[in-house]
């Protein structure tokens, strides 16, 4: 169980205009960039174009994860495909001084959002192979490995594998109930 982390203190909310600089600052941190396909420092102009599209996105969800009202991280649910009932997701913790357990809380709320608010039955993600901790966390939440793309991504002179993972909505309610006490303190929320 996370040390005192209460579900009632955690929420996802849509991004808003005032989040623009915060998201850019988070995204340009070395530790965040290292886990992304795009690892260059993002300029104000590049971010401004992306942010404007994100604010206008109809089907995609760009969300801020908050703990006790304080923005802590970012979640995106994108490439929503209604015909095939699936979407892709990504997330990162932006604040370095985040309480223990924030990643699990973000993942749980993201799965809730994808399966309930967005309404897809399959949520997919890609993780760079060297990011084994994130792969383990996704598996803990019921993601299954659907493939491994060998030497699929090049950064400089180095090639990296990409792990393809997916979680289905079927069984999420039961899995969520079992995971909840591991993620949140017993606050009954």
Image: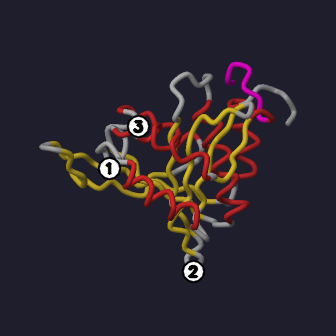
Q: Mark 3: which secondary structure?
A: helix
Q: Mark 2: which secondary structure?
A: loop
Q: Residues within 10 Å of mark 2 (few under 14, many from 20)?
A: few
Q: Is residue 141 magenta?
A: no
Inter-mark Cα distance, 1 to 3: 10 Å
* Screen quadrant of the N terminus: top right
Inter-mark Cα distance, 2 to 1: 28 Å
Q: Quadrant of residue 131?
A: top left
Q: Which mark is drawn over residue 187?
A: none
Residue contact between numbered discs 2 and 3, judged by CB atoms under 8 Å: no
- For the residue pair 93 and 160, the one nearer the viewer reads as 93
Residue stretch rendered in magenta on the structure: 1-7
Image coords of residue 108 (percent x, y)? 66, 43
Residue at 67% in and 64% down = 118
Image coords of residue 152 (percent x, y)? 24, 55
Residue carrying label 2 = 83
Q: Residue furthest top?
A: 3
Among numbered discs 1 and 3, the one appearing first in the sequence: 3
Residue at 37% in and 57% down = 147
Inter-mark Cα distance, 2 to 3: 32 Å
64 lies left or right of 180: left
Q: Is residue 6 magenta?
A: yes
Among numbered discs 2 and 3, the one appearing first in the sequence: 3
Residue at 72% in and 61% down = 117
Image coords of residue 39 (percent x, y)? 31, 44
Residue carrying label 1 = 38
Among numbered discs 2 and 1, the one appearing first in the sequence: 1
Residue carrying label 3 = 32
């Amino acid at each position: 169980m996370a040390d005192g982390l209460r579900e009632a203190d955690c929420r996802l909310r849509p991004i808003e205009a005032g989040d623009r600089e915060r998201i850019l600052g988070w995204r340009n941190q070395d530790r965040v960039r290292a886990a992304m396909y795009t690892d260059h420092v993002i300029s104000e102009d590049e971010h401004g174009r992306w942010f404007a599209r994100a604010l206008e996105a109809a089907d995609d969800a760009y969300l801020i994860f908050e703990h006790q009202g304080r923005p802590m991280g970012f979640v995106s649910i994108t490439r929503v495909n209604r015909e095939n009932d699936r979407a892709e997701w990504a997330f990162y913790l932006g604040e370095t001084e985040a309480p223990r357990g924030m990643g699990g809380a973000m993942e749980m709320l993201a799965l809730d959002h994808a399966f309930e608010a967005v309404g897809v039955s399959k949520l997919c993600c890609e993780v760079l192979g060297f990011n084994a901790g994130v792969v383990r966390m996704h598996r803990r939440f019921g993601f299954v490995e659907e493939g491994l793309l060998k030497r699929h991504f090049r950064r400089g002179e180095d090639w990296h594998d990409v792990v393809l993972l997916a979680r289905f909505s079927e069984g999420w309610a039961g899995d969520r109930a079992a995971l909840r006490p591991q993620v949140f303190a017993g606050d009954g929320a």
